[in-house]
Amino acid sequence: MNGELSAIRTDKGRRLLAALALDVGRPLSHELLAGRLWDEEPPPSAVASIYSHVSRIRRQLRMAAAAESPGSPRDIPTIESRSHTYALRADTHLIDWHRFVDLSKNARQLADNGDDIQARTVLGRAEEIWRGEPLAGLPGGWAQSTRATMADQRLATTLLRIEIDLRLGRFGEVVPELTALREERPTDERVAAHLLVALHGAGRQAEALAVYPAVVRRLHADLGTGPGEALTRLHERMLTGAPLTGPAVRTPAGPRPAPGPRGGAAPSPPPGRHMIGRRDDLRRLLGSTGDAVEHGGVVTVSAILGMAGVGKTTLALHAAHLMRARFPEGYAHLNLGAHIVNRHPLTPSAVATALLRRLGVPAATIPLDSEELFAQCADLLATRRAVVVLDDAATAAQIRPLLPTAPASLVFVTSRRRLAELPGSRPVFLDILPVDDAVALFTSVVGRERADDRSRIVEIVDRCGLLPLAIEIAASRFKARPSWTLAHLAQRLSRKTGRLAEIRHDTESVARAFEMSYRSLPTEQQEAFRLLGAHPGPDIGLHAAAALFGRPVDETDHLLEALLHCHLVQEDTPERYQLHDLIREYAHVLTRDEGGSEEAATALRRLLGFALHAADRADRLIYPRRSRLPLPTLRQLPGAEGLLYDLDLDSNDSARKWLDTEQSGLIVLAGHARSTGHPETAAWLAHVLAGHLDSQAYWSEAHELHQASATYWRSVPNDRCEARALIDLGATLANASRYPAAQEALQRGLTLARADHDDDATAEALSLLGALHWYRSSLTEALALQEESLRIRRETGDLWNTARCLANIGILENSLGNQEKAMGAYETALPLARRLGNRTLELRILNNLGDLYLGIRDHSAARASFEQVLNLENGSMPHFELAVVRINLAASLPAPEQLERVLSLYRSALTTFRRTGSIRHESIALAGLGDALLTVGRAEEARDQLALAMELAKSVGAAREEVAALRGLGQCEHLLGAPARAVAHLTRAVVLAEQAEATEEATLAREALARLGSADAE
């Protein structure tokens, strides 16, 4: 406008305008436009988004029209919409591509009529229009395939201009250009023929003679075929000294020669060397094909897609072999060369030429003009029932021009890319092998006599990532080393570094296969792939990847999608990306060898900064009142404000979902940070994650993190931070039933907190120590600690922690037999929890009330409390605490009448307690299970459960739980006719309960002992 460019700033907007402009005047449906803008997966909002982009483009067009001077002869383009379509109405000469095509067609017509001078002038004008790469900067499969089509058209135009130059005798002028074209397209016979004529005409005979043998070698190496008749005849004329009056003559337009005889196809190749398993994949590949054949239907193209080494070619060749009888009129297998070292992939024209030759079409009848060539190829595949394997395709554009709308042939395409733009194709995505198939593949290579230890073979194929190529290479190497044992191979493959170097044999290696995929990537995708190798976690989300890459989220999304299309990353769940084990190791090697230590270190700092601040935000949303330190500003970590703003962390639910998803990766990242020179960040990350790790019962992982944090803060030193790390550590150890270690950590944390006058940390340590003494049945000491903690909380006005302390005091008073005091504490705490809107604390108090009712044997009220907790929790309580509620509910149910429900509740809880490692709670559940079995007379089963419960409780010093188990054991022995053992168990229970001040348990044990005496007296 006004002499300045009016830019469309979004990729989608520019892609939309390009799509409309290339089909100017033609109505394009919303679905077609969505496919061009979003490739294979348009979002649900695609139509609305297209409407928005169209509106913005229309606005810019109107502004351009307004900026035109009155009386301007130019017509401003407009976008028309009608019946779910959009069309660009514009003069085609305003669009460079259409001007270029029109000029090229005019030039060809002039040349065909013998006016080479005028044709050369018109071609010069056409080539002036071509400036740089078409659709430059537009991402996506449609843009990529369109660029390839345009490049083919430009080549045809260039070759026409060179033909004219040769006819005009300008031999020397075109040699440099033809030499460069030959470097790019070494198997293109049109280019070779023109270069031969140009060199000969320029008097460079030796160079001209070298052209033909070089082309012959490349055709044999790349396509497995020889040169066509036109090039051969041209070479022979030069050898005999016959005059070369011009370039090879084009096949004139008109009816195409009929294809060669249908029975003269090449013999079928054998199926893949080691086709093991893949039954489901083969069924998916051939199932619908078989149905179509039986019913005379159309057979679509099948695209076999997957990472390097996953067995795509083997499956394609095997499938082709199986279908030869149904498609008897020809066979062709072409390697399209997407991943051949030091060679460019075949052009669409080269693919079409080679395919026609393989299917028996005489070389003399194969056109040189690309449009005629593609048309002949499509006609052949539409009419001949042949099997075609197009192996290792680089892009859909490489083969799309060859394929008809409704092929009669069966076409298998293999590619490491997803080929979303391949029309009418049915994708079959190959994954790694199941373990049994992987073992069978290894065995088939080495032979059964050496495959004598299945467990070792399982270890070997697992170290090969269950990747067929890696397994075959490792097996072939083992087979060639008769002195090696399976244990020796497994040991070599188990080395911490260098596993990729071990998976090699002769000239084959799995790393080489990965390298071909990597080298085909643009620079920015290579960098992204390398950095993924620096990420230590099992998978990575979009925002974490953006931090790792140091790029905006949208740009990161494009990079990950590109790597996904190349099968260098996997996406098992939406926007969670991971690398296959071997590819991860390859990326790690690249990070070290190509990216350099600074690239990886900078990326790690960005990732740590994002992870720490995101976890901090999530923690404060989920546990807003948790006792913890504020996060400091860490100068060495780049800011993550933009990513955090984009991250959906604005509610308790979204924060919990994010932490649940990222938790395992954050734990690994904290350990990695510690080992790579970032111990302070690791320590802060441990502190930020403490609340979630505790609530989700990840005590083993939390123990390692907090222990390392405490050690780091002590070394700095930083007493305040060390106190917090020790308190976090003590809480974790107590939950894991490691009571002596927990008491040591909490006592030191309390000492440091008091010395630092940190009231919050002091109260937290006192409360945790009180809980620990309760676990160990030191009830009086526990009560004193909780009351001191309560005093601090009240003095500081901390209502939430006041309610927590009151709930803990209620538990202790109940255990001491002071039910009225316990009820008073609960009745004070419960309204506080409700007033603060803390549902989790409210439910904990209701559970404690139910436990109180159990103690006074009001089973109905207890059951009502526990059922209320389970009905209200709605995901607000951690799984571990829900398991505690379930065993309490089980204890309140009448066992004979609801035995199955009781047993189910106990067993479900046992699974949780064993998974988390809470020995004390496992003992409680086992004792409850034993008591339930005892009530229905299954005394022997009950004794087994109760004996284990007693041993577990004893092992961690949980006296009250040991008393409960002993009481049940005494009753079991009585029923089983062992009165002496029954008396011994019950007597021990009474003594231990009195020592532990467990009034209720002591009373129950005495009553059981009295009943035993009465029974003996009778």
Image: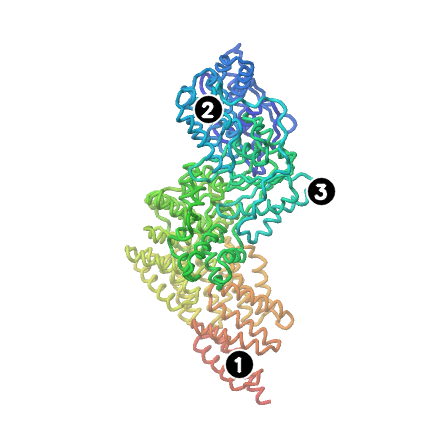
Q: Of helix, strand and loop, which one carries label 3?
A: loop
Q: Which residue is mark 3?
A: 295
Q: How many marks?
A: 3
Residue located at (64% from left, 25% from top): 82
- Where 975 falls versus 957 (above or below)? below
Residue 322: image tag: none
Chain-order first, disc 3 or disc 1: 3
Labels 2 and 3: the sequence-earlier one: 2
Q: Residues within 10 Å of mark 2 (few under 14, many from 20)?
A: some
The outermost residue toward the bottom is: 1017
Sequence-first disc among 1 and 2: 2
Q: Badge 1 is on which residue?
A: 970
Which image quarter is the C terminus in? bottom right
Identify which amino acid the numbered label 2 is placed on.
Met
Amino acid type of the residue that numbered disc 1 sits on in the rendered structure: Gly
Label 3 or label 1, whichever lies nearer to me, is 3
Q: Which mark is residue 238?
A: 2
Taking the spot 51% from the left edge, 46% from the top edge, the residue there is 571
The image shows residue 748 at horizontal and vertical percentages of 33, 63
Q: Look at the image and tell me whether residue 184 can be seen.
A: yes
The answer for how far apart the CA atoms under marks 3 and 1 are is: 77 Å
Mark yes or no: residue 613 visible. Answer: no
**Residue 902 against residue 137 in the figure, above or below:** below
Question: How far apart, in angstroms, are the residues tagged by discs 1 and 2?
Answer: 110 Å
Front-lying residue, 893 or 202:
202
The answer to whether the residues at label 1 and label 2 have Cβ atoms under 8 Å apart is no
The crowd level at tag 1 (other Cα within 10 Å; few <14, some 14-19, many 20+) is many
The reply to whether discs 3 and 1 touch (Cβ–Cβ < 8 Å) is no
SS label for mark 1: helix
Residue 294, by quadrant, is top right
**Residue 938: x and y, percent?**
60, 77
